[in-house]
Image (cartoon, rainbow, N blue to C red):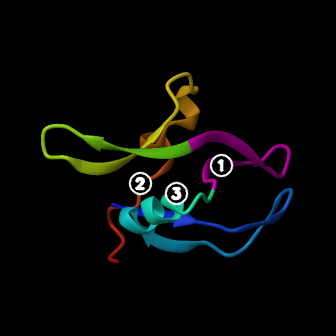
């Protein structure tokens, strides 16, 4: 799976997106970088912050996967926001 990352320069100013693999995102999280889901609001013309992204080891294969916090809204869900499987890495 691939993830599109944008570096935040300041409020509602992002760099051009970079297609990144999940392992790179997990390494960023391990180095204490904060990563959140975001969605463009066409009506307000701003980025709307979603949920904080973290990772965990999934049983039984002990693979590291990206997750969001348990109380997040459905629109913050990584599965709803990241559909980039068709892009080659």
Q: Quadrant of the N terminus?
A: bottom left
Q: Tell me, for residue 55, which label it has, or none.
A: none
- The mark closer to the camera, 1 or 2, is 1
Q: Where residue 13 sits: x, y (%)? A: 82, 65
Query: For mark 1, what is the residue?
Result: 38
Which residue lies at the image location 47% right of the left edge and 62% below the top edge?
Answer: 25
Residue 51 among magenta residues: yes
Q: Where residue 17 sits: x, y (%)? A: 61, 72
Q: Nearer the viewer, residue 43 or 32?
A: 32
In the rendered image, the residue lying farthest to the front is 31
Q: Nearer the viewer, residue 56 or 76?
A: 56
Query: For mark 2, what is the residue?
Result: 83
Q: Tell me, for residue 29, which label it has, or none.
A: 3
Q: Earlier in the sequence, mark 1 or mark 3?
A: 3
Q: Which picture quadrant has residue 87?
A: bottom left
Instruction: Say what secondary structure mark 2 lies in.
Output: loop
Q: Where residue 26 sits: x, y (%)? A: 43, 59
Which residue lies at the image location 49% right of the left edge and 58% below the top edge?
Answer: 30
- The mark closer to the camera, 1 or 3, is 3
State which region is magenta: 34-52
Q: Quadrant of the C terminus?
A: bottom left
């Amino acid at each position: 799976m691939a993830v599109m990352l944008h570096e935040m320069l300041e409020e509602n100013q992002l760099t051009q997106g970079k297609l990144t693999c999940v392992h790179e995102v997990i390494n960023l999280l391990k180095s204490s970088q904060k990563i959140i889901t975001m969605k463009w609001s066409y009506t307000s013309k701003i980025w709307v912050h979603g949920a904080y992204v973290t990772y965990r080891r999934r049983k039984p294969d002990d693979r590291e996967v990206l997750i969001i916090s348990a109380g997040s809204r459905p629109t913050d869900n990584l599965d709803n926001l990241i559909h980039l499987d068709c892009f080659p890495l």
